[in-house]
Amino acid sequence: MKTALALSAAVAAIVFTATTSNGQSGPSALEKARALMKEAPLVDGHNDLPWAMRQNARYDFDKLDIRQPQAALHTDIPKVRAGQLGAQLWSVYVPSSMQGQAAVTATLEQIDTVYELTRRYPDVFEIARTADDVERIFKAGRVASLIGMEGGHSIDASLQTLRMMHRLGARYLTLTHSANVPWADSATDEPVHGGLSPFGETVVREMNYLGMLVDLSHVSADTMRDALRVSEAPVIFSHSSARALCNVRRNVPDDVLAMMPKNGGVVMVTFVPSFVSQAVADWDAQLEKLREQWRADIADDAGRKAAEAAWRTAHPEPKATLATVADHIDHVRKIAGIDHVGIGGDFDGIDHGPDGLENVSKYPDLVAELVRRGYSDEDVKKVIGLNTIRVLRQAERVAARIQAQRAPSVATIR
């Protein structure tokens, strides 16, 4: 009886602690998440809305007005507001199939689209170039909008082009995309350089000179290690997850995660289903092998599409979930530390997000999951944005030091 009474008293104490003075329940995890997101900006490392605007409307915001809900997009202003997005590193992506001047031109068009976004909707978005800008714009109630180039082919192996892209606002460069560049190996191509070439090391050093973040998503593990060896400033992974939980080459292996504290960088965990769920990754790999077989065996496109449709019906795609993404955040925290994890959704660069993370309105649900998993208030704020702001500020300090020591590099690839 004493045990039962003691247990009853303990339960009552817990209930009392969780109630307010007027007898109402305390804040839910989601309410707590939304409150924390008002104190620190949620900074997303990667969103492909500029390319989606090219594909869907040839960059014409009259044709695709994101002030209105857009079912075809993961990103529009109602979703941005619902998701409490604080700052966005907009990807100015061009595919690896574009090379040379075509890639440079398309990148400039993508940059122009970010500027048009901020001109068209100035009450919502504002261009940011520095960490101070991000904090000021967030406090003003707008989304701080930074620019990130996705793929070294965007500079056509030219340091002069790199510097001009920085002057136009580019604040990171992903060293490769899906294919190698003449100075760095990609994660999804056959290795040529064994990581960075000597000119690739020069590119990294010039990015340090500029204060431009070195982005190691999409690069090979050897390129990751080389860049971490060379870079004097913290690096980022703008949209990658943990290879230990999902064994695909686009993810970050544990030995590289363990290098992050010394470098000071941040791994921005992505939502791409095939990068967070091993079941989805295996399903994708099986489908790609079958597509190769169908291309060899079935002459007409209609026949190949019918074969794929039949296979999909018999083998439904597995589901990644919000909890799966949180597992990757947990893992990066475990190996790299709480100061080295962030968020990089890749919205509008993927067909669909995990269950529970369907679009940019869902960020508070992910933050609430971290609250439920016992993350402290300060740790939540680090994950959602303070880590990335710190990295931006450190890169600016490194740039100021290097610029006091030397002039811009005149190196060329040959």
Image (tube, grey):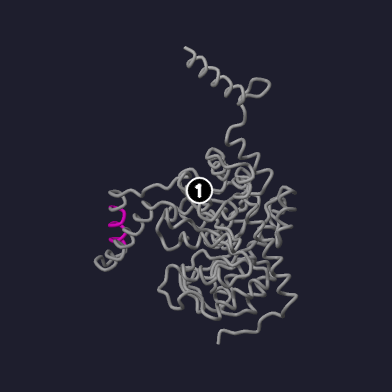
Q: Residue furthest left?
A: 297
* Front residue (pair 138, 247): 247
Q: Where is residue 300 drawn, in percent x and y?
A: 29, 65
Highlighted range, magenta = 302-310
Residue occupying the point 57% across, 35% down = 29
Please indicate whether residue 242 sits to the left or right of residue 138 in the image: left
Count the labels in the image. 1
* Front residue (pair 121, 293): 293
Residue 262 higher or lower than 84, as above or below: below
Q: Where is residue 295 drawn, in percent x and y?
A: 29, 67
* Front residue (pair 195, 58): 195
Visible residue check, residue 57: no
Q: Where is residue 89 drawn, in percent x and y?
A: 61, 59
Residue occupying the point 61% across, 68% down = 109
Q: Which residue is mark 1?
A: 330
Residue occupying the point 70% across, 65% down = 396
Residue 13 higher or lower than 74, as above or below: above
Q: Amino acid at mark 1?
A: Asp
Q: Residue furthest front?
A: 2
Q: Is residue 303 magenta?
A: yes
